[in-house]
Structure formats: C-alpha cells, structure tokens
C-alpha cells in the first residue's frame, strides 16, 4: 500500500472525513474516526477489488521538507529516517507510517498516518476483499486535479467543516510545482483563516518570490473576500478511479 500510488488499475474510492464516509456516491454518517462496524458496512456496499482511500488532512499530516540532502539506503533505514524527519518538522506524537516523494531541487514531500490506524484499516479492507491499494491525503487528491490545469501560480484551501462555521484543513501553493504545505487541525472560522493563516502565508511566499495569483477553495459552499481572487470549487467525489 502506498500513500502516493497512482497506477492504471480501476479501484473503488473510499472517502473519509470526520463524521462521514463516502462510497459509491453515497454519504454515510460515521464517528469522527469511523468504527470497524461503520467501515465494514461501507466497504461491503462496494464491489470487491482494490480501493483508493482519500483521507482527511488531519489524519495524514504532511510537510514539504527542503533540507534533506541524502536519505539512508535500505527500506527500513529510509522509513525510520522519514518517521524521524516528519516528527522533527511537525512534532507529531505516537508511531507513524511515513512515506516520502522526492521533488528534485524542491525537496521531499513527506506524508504520515498513525501506524495503528493504517494497519487496522488495511487489515479490515483485506479481510473484506477490498484491499487498500493507496491512501491519499485529501489536499493531495485536490492538488493533483487543479494545479496541473492552472497556468498561473496559485493557492489551494483544502477544508473540512467542523461545525459552527469553522474549518480545519490545509493551505497548499504551487509555482510550476508544489511550493508549500501548511496544515491546521484546530478549527477556525473563515475570517480567522484569512487573517491568521492565508495572509501570513501570502506574505511568506512573497518574500520567497512565489506570490500566488489566485485562491481555490474546496470544502465550504462560499468564501468571503480575500486578498487574492478566489473561486470555490466542488469536484465530484468519484465512485471509482485509477489506482
């Protein structure tokens, strides 16, 4: 199973955000972290075969790391190094499975997931004949759909509504390629996202000469006026997709 696997086989999409699972075009109510029973019912409603899981950003802490000059040889040593590096950068607690993708001169993209949760979900899926072929952070799933089609540098908000008009989620930016990933697991209203998260991120990117020219927002139905021209978009959650 690979957090970043994109191959040509068709698989069923399993979409998980706090309090909901989406499979086969149907949204199911769930706990904040779906229980085994809730996952079993959802997985049994789709055909057997490989699955691609799109996971809430809070479940898959990610970082763009630029100070990695060399990684150890051997899979075990490399895995241990990536776990250490993600813990160093994001201060995540507990045991994590961490995978890295090299981005050339732009560094490495690291994404993790709690190891016990990953093991429980992959084992359950395998037992039910819906084995996990890939687990992908929601922000990365969205980024791969929008950034490649944009001609100007931009910024993406990958948001999850937590109730009371507040959101958790990620800010992602690109300038020809991925340039920044920032994430917040503490919920905030749209106004606070703009003043405390978006505006400082724009200022940071300006200092680095990578000013975004547009903002794409995923999650809410609408979004207040921002320092950047913005567009709210809602791509359909596919029932199946290449895995």
Image: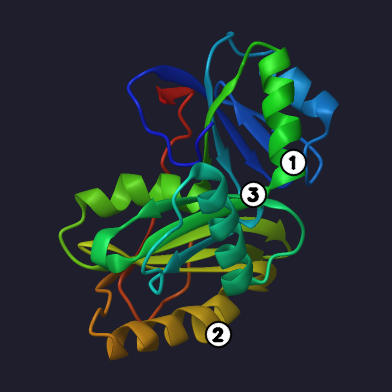
Quarter placement of the C terminus = top left
The residue that mark 3 highlights is 113
| CA separation in Å, label 3 and label 1 | 8 Å
Q: Residues within 10 Å of mark 2 (few under 14, many from 20)?
A: few
The residue that mark 2 highlights is 196
Which element is circle 3 on? strand
Place residue 16 in its image quadrant.
top right
User: Measured from the top left, where is residue 35 in percent x and y?
Assistant: 83, 33
Quarter placement of the N terminus = top right
Q: How many marks?
A: 3
Numbered disc in front, either 3 or 2: 3
Residue at the image point whose x is 82% and y is 41% from the top = 31
| CA separation in Å, label 2 and label 1 | 31 Å
The residue that mark 1 highlights is 117
Residue 216 shows in this picture: no
User: Measured from the top left, where is residue 87 in percent x and y?
Assistant: 63, 67
Relative to 126, say whether 1 is above or below.
below
């Amino acid at each position: 199973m690979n957090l970043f696997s994109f191959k040509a086989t068709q698989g069923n999409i399993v979409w998980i955000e706090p309090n909901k699972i989406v499979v086969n075009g149907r949204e199911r109510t769930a706990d904040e972290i779906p229980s085994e029973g809730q996952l079993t019912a959802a997985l049994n409603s789709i055909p057997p075969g490989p699955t691609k899981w799109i996971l809430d950003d809070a479940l898959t802490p990610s970082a763009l790391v630029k100070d990695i000059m060399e990684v150890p040889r051997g899979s075990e040593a490399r895995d241990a190094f990536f776990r250490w590096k993600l813990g160093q950068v994001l201060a995540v607690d507990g045991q994590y499975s961490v995978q890295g993708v090299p981005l050339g001169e732009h560094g490495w993209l690291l994404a993790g997931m709690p190891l016990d949760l990953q093991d429980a979900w992959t084992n359950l899926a395998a037992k039910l004949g819906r084995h996990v072929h890939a687990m992908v952070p929601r922000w990365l799933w969205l980024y791969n759909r929008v950034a490649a089609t944009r001609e100007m540098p931009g910024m993406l908000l990958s948001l999850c509504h937590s109730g009371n008009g507040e959101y958790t989620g990620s800010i992602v930016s690109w300038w020809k390629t991925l340039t920044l990933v920032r994430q917040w697991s503490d919920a905030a209203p749209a106004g606070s996202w703009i003043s405390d998260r978006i505006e400082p991120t724009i200022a940071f990117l300006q200092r680095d000469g990578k000013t975004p020219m547009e903002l794409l927002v995923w999650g809410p139905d609408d979004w207040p006026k921002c320092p950047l021209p913005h567009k709210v978009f809602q791509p359909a959650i596919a029932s199946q997709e290449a895995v």
